[in-house]
Image (tube, rainbow, N blue to C red):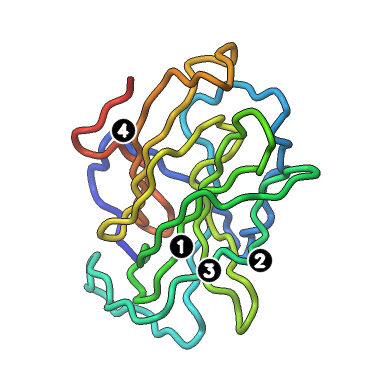
């Protein structure tokens, strides 16, 4: 796992994880996408420890942040139980990107998901997936963006172990969902068993 850096920049936000790593599905009560959302200040997300398969040996001390060569296939989004409540419609994977986020040599998949609504602009959730046991579907181990934040993800990539996203949001709860008025960029990186959110170099909010 990546070591905690000293002197972490003030703009970085630590996404707190549960004490028990297998609590990926013990998330806060999901909301229906059409419920009235209150503007969320800052970032509220839950992450769990990314667990390698039992056959994966632990990294020796002193390996730093360099990732081992990735040889395994990235987790598929098919059949995944995403922590989003969509009522009578299905959860739709809009975007996905893969890469080794925790340096264990096995790739994770980051998925952007929202409810497949016939009208309106349902908000996106951003989730990190790891491979399931045996033939089981992949499982969600971290929530980077919760649908309750009312954000739309316009761009997603994984670069050198970091998750990068372009976001559209709202300056207040009074702004209609048709017309987001805030543009932002975010970067998440796995450090000391948690995802750290920061603003990518050169990016700024509008």
Return the residue nearer the eye: 88 or 66: 88
Q: Are dots 2 and 1 in contact, CB under 8 Å?
A: no
Q: Are dots 3 and 2 in contact, CB under 8 Å?
A: yes
Q: Is mark 2 on a helix, strand or loop?
A: loop
Please tell me in which quadrant of the rendered image residue 122 appears: top right
Query: Distance between the Cα atoms at labels 2 and 1?
Result: 14 Å
Looking at the image, which residue is at 51% across and 42% down? Answer: 145
Q: Which mark is residue 76?
A: 3
Closer mark to the observer between disc 2 and disc 4: 2
Residue 50: give x, y in percent of width and height.
48, 65
Which residue occupies the extreme right position in the image? 88
Looking at the image, which residue is at 69% across and 36% down? Answer: 118
Which residue occupies the extreme top position in the image? 174
Looking at the image, which residue is at 53% across and 73% down? Answer: 131
Q: Are dots 4 and 3 in contact, CB under 8 Å?
A: no
Q: Mark 4 points at which residue?
A: 11
Query: Distance between the Cα atoms at labels 3 and 1?
Result: 7 Å
Please tell me in which quadrant of the rendered image residue 158 appears: bottom left
3 relative position to 81: left or right: left
How many tags in the picture? 4
Q: Mark 1 points at which residue?
A: 109
Q: Which mark is residue 79?
A: 2
Query: Distance between the Cα atoms at labels 4 and 1?
Result: 25 Å
Q: How many residues crowd around disc 2 within 10 Å: few (fewer than 14), some, or many (20 or more)?
A: few
Q: Up-down: is 68 above or below 162?
A: below
Q: Up-down: is 121 above or below 69?
A: above
Closer mark to the observer between disc 2 and disc 1: 2
Q: Is mark 1 on a helix, strand or loop?
A: strand
Q: What element carries label 3?
A: loop
16 relative position to 118: left or right: left
Q: How many residues crowd around disc 1 within 10 Å: few (fewer than 14), some, or many (20 or more)?
A: many
Q: Which of marks 3 and 1 is nearer the N terminus?
A: 3
């Amino acid at each position: 796992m990546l070591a905690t850096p000293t002197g972490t920049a003030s703009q970085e936000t630590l996404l707190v994880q549960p004490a028990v790593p297998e609590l990926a599905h013990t998330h806060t009560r999901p909301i229906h996408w059409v419920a009235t959302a209150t503007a969320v200040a800052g970032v509220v997300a839950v992450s769990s420890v990314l667990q390698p398969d039992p056959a994966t040996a632990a990294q020796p001390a002193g390996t730093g942040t360099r990732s081992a060569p990735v040889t395994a296939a990235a987790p598929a989004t098919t059949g995944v139980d995403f922590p989003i409540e969509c009522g009578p419609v299905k959860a739709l994977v809009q975007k996905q990107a893969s890469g080794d986020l925790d340096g264990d040599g096995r790739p994770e998949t980051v998925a952007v998901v929202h409810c497949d609504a016939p009208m309106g602009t349902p908000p996106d959730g951003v989730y990190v997936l790891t491979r399931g046991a045996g033939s089981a579907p992949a499982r969600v181990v971290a929530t980077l963006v919760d649908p309750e934040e009312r954000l739309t993800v316009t761009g997603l990539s994984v670069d050198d172990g970091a998750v990068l996203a372009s976001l559209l949001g709202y300056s207040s709860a009074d702004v209609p969902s048709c017309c987001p008025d805030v543009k932002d960029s975010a970067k998440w990186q796995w450090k000391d068993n948690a995802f750290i959110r920061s603003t990518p170099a050169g990016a700024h909010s509008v």
